[in-house]
Amino acid sequence: MAAQPADTIYHGGTILTIDDDNPVVDAVAVADGRILAVGTEAAVLATADDGTQRVNLAGRTMLPGFVDSHGHAFAIGLQASTANLLPPPDGEGADIPALQRLLAGWADTNRGTVDKVGWIVGFGYDDSQLAEQRHPTRDELDAVSTEVPVLIIHQSGHLGVANSKALELAGVGAETADPPGGVYRRRAGSREPNGVLEENGFYAVLMKLAGGFDAATNDQLVITGTQFAASFGYTTVQEGRAQQDAMDAMRRVAGRGELAVDLVAYPDMLAVKDIEPSPAYDNRYRVGGVKLTIDGSPQGKTAYLSQPYFHPPHGQDEDYRGYGAIDEATVMASVERAFANGWQILCHANGDAAIDQFIDAVRAARGKYPEVEVRPVLIHGQTLRLDQVDDLKALKIFPSLFPMHTFYWGDWHRESVLGPVRADNISPTGWLLERGMMFGSHHDAPVALPDSMRVLSATVTRRSRSGDILGPEHRVPVATALKALTIWPAWQHFEEDTKGSIEPGKLADFVVLSANPLEVPEDALDDIVVEQTIKEDRVIYRR
């Protein structure tokens, strides 16, 4: 028997360690929430004593718990608590009448919530997937209610639509100017808002809604969001653009010991004043660094591109390239501030013009602070150019990409947003692998569900809704895609010594899958389901 006996031994299935030196083992022993031993069943069973629990995997596959390369845990809670307007296969939001029906049904079922919050809210509509191929209008939401404010949030999280009552409460009318970095779309031939809100125009109205949430509501959003992510195998979850109310709620929930997963927060550095990152968790919570957002959404046609959109949005001319959410001077100053303070910085940049600004800012900051290593992260990078990939490598910028776009919006990118040439190269993981670079593959929930197997499938197959393969040269092997869900985002978060692979000394964070991703046909990867999620040897989700 070993000097320290195992608390638990996992055996009887396939165990994929994501350790290149020891990729598949028969069994794993755990003591005090950490991995004690891995190897053959006979060797690992030697660590047992009379008190050791033996967990038979019954032929299923166990991997290290997934590490969230980018998502929004607080907003996932909002998604799970509002009307589901997602289009098929994740919801029923296929046309505008369906959105109206879903909103009215949710309001009837959740009358207590509506009375408490004072709003009817839906999440996940997508104009690119609606039969009408457009956003709803304020008038169509007035059909749901003229007395209660109604707000629906676009699946990108960068746009929304408000009914007349919501616009009235937010103080948005014909005389209201567009805010910097945002747009209030107008009725044809008029200054009267049509209800569609872009970027900072949308956030201004959303903040009116969030301002009505009390502490208990915000705390429940944290709990609901992290639990939902855990159901997809994530044992480390990210809140990738936290506002002050969310920061306060996460601290409260952690202080009460109510987090089942590790939660890493990145406050919006332009909105949150007191920022104190820490490498250590306190009751499963820590601040990992800061977040900066340069532009918007490619599928919403607000990302900042260097070349015009293939088909510009309604009301824009042929030269329309999107726009920045902030100006270049703010980008430069913000990145320098992060380096000066030794803060890790995550930067949302979708359009290649926005990516250029982030690259330029990191280059300047590295020149001024050459000894500082904060592992800067590019979030999304949808329209990365080949020359920019070389810049990322030279400047040691970690790319956290969003290959799930190829499924959800691949056809839309090809036919409307970018055209066939640029669309083939969204989330260009093939270029990264050619250069020996690590990357993260994320879900950006609530933009999409935090569905780890959908992330895996899209990273490997790049198959769109129509069945087209977008950029076949950017498909990656399953084993590589699994690293982009585990060890590489663990490195991204400075946690590669404790997470991301099944090795002695690391945390006993595991996910149990219904099948082995290395053995099922690639087109069946998204049929795999998460059976269990285990955090430090404790089951936190069971199917």
Image (spheres, helix red, strand yellow):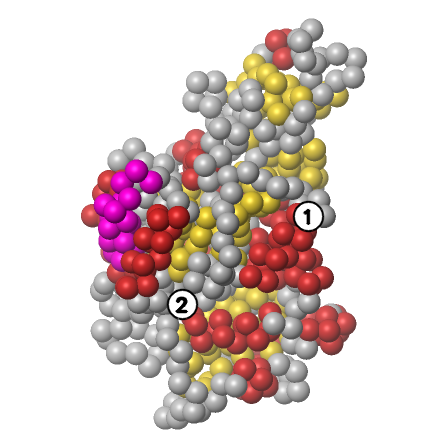
Which secondary structure, mark 2? loop
Point out the image quarter for the N terminus. top right
Of helix, strand and loop, which one carries label 1?
A: helix
x and y percentages locating residue 133 in the rendered image: 43, 73
Extreme residue in the right direction: 50
Expressed as whole percent of the image width and height from the top left, the position of residue 252 reads 67, 53
Q: Magenta stretch? A: 356-372
Judge left or right: residue 187 versus residue 121: left
Q: Nearer the viewer, residue 537 or 243?
A: 243
Provide residue 46's location: percent of width, then percent of height: 67, 8
Q: Is residue 276 left or right of residue 8?
A: left
Residue beneath the point at 56% across and 14% down: 39
Pointers 2 and 1 in contact (CB under 8 A)? Answer: no
Residue 46 lies, with reference to residue 392, above or below; the image says: above
- For the stretch drawn in magenta, the main secondary structure is helix
The residue that disc 1 covers is 255
How crowded is the residue under tag 1: few (<14 C-alpha within 10 Å), some, or many (20+)?
A: some
Q: Which residue is mark 2?
A: 300
N-terminal label among 2 and 1: 1
Quadrant housing the C terminus:
top right
Identify the disc placed on residue 450.
Answer: none
Residue at 53%, 69% in the rendered image: 153
Vertical placement of residue 90 versus 199, above or below? above
The answer to if 367 sits in the magenta stretch is: yes
Q: Three-letter amino acid code at disc 1?
A: Gly
Residue 196 percent coordinates (x, y): 46, 78
Identify residue type, mark 2: Gly
249 vs 372: above or below: below
